[in-house]
Amino acid sequence: MSGRKTEEPGTSAAKRRKTPIWLRKPGRWISQNGIFAAVVAWIAVRYLKFVFRTNSWVVEPEDILDQVTPELPVVVSVWHGQHVLLPAIPIGLSGAVMISRSLDGEITARVAEAFGATTIRASGGRNPRHTLSKGALRGFLEMLATLKGGESVLQTADIPKGTPRRAGQGIIALAQKSGRPIVPLAVASSRRWVLPKSWDRTTINLPFGKSAIVAGERIWVAADAGPDGLEAARIGLQNEMDRITRRAYELTGVPEEDAARSGEEG
């Protein structure tokens, strides 16, 4: 006989099974609802196009594409929370992007694909025990294969749900194993709204402002780099990302420390 206990009709567990999931767990229902994700993504795509078209743009350096083209494919690095507008910007550095399997990840993936990017659905997160279950290893191998196949990839430098704007070793390992350089990239807008409770200072770019794209110095990671060399590369990337992020906000005329004020004005 099976040791599993059979639940009698009328028990709380049986009642929970009869209750529609959209009432018991609305968050899970939404995350599994493709129609909801499609509608939100449709709205997001049109909003991002509107923001791009109604902002004036500054690119630094102006010849960044000429500089990077001989080095393609590359690993484009951005900070979490500062990447919302990136899919709508025709900067010529499109490629594959790794996106989580969460609800916001599903929406983000649909938006990225609408702008021509290819997506790799995986996420590592902070807990090493969840790495395989979330497909982080598979995602890493897919990005590595993408680079070896000649296509660039876009990856956030900081770890999901970790310390914001602290570069992780994942992107450094990707650059080392692929032999491709990291191109730090920052995008900022003068009119913006920073989500107050977001761990990564997620920034929603607003229309009718001034925006800037700044690319940093390429970060190369030697194939034979040891622990000290890998850590030096990580710190170098983090410092360069911080520098270009400050510079991007300076170019908009509204430094980042004024983000709350600019959001209120928006």
Image (cartoon, rainbow, N blue to C red):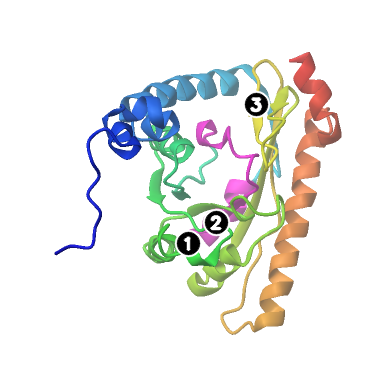
Say if the magenta span includes residue 1: no
Q: Which quadrant of the view contains residue 2? A: bottom left
**Circle 1: residue type:** His
**Residue found at x 46% / y 47%:** 99
Choose the circle earlier in sequence order: 2 or 3: 2
Determine whether 61 is above or below 262 in the image: below
- Residue 40 image offset from top left, x and y in percent: 43, 23
Q: Is residue 153 left or right of residue 39?
A: right
- Quadrant in which the N terminus is drawn: bottom left
Q: Which residue is mark 3?
A: 205
Q: CA distance from mark 2 to mark 1?
A: 7 Å
Q: Residues within 10 Å of mark 2 (few under 14, many from 20)?
A: some
Badge 1 density bin: few <14, some 14–19, many ≥20, Cα 10 Å: few
Disc with the residue nearer the chain's start (2 vs 1): 2
Residue marked by disc 1? 130
Residue on which disc 2 sits: 125
**229, 29: nearer the viewer:** 29
Nearest the viewer among 8 and 260 is 8
78 in the magenta segment: yes
Amino acid type shown at disc 2: Gly
Q: Quadrant of residue 239?
A: bottom right
The magenta-colored residue range is 64-90
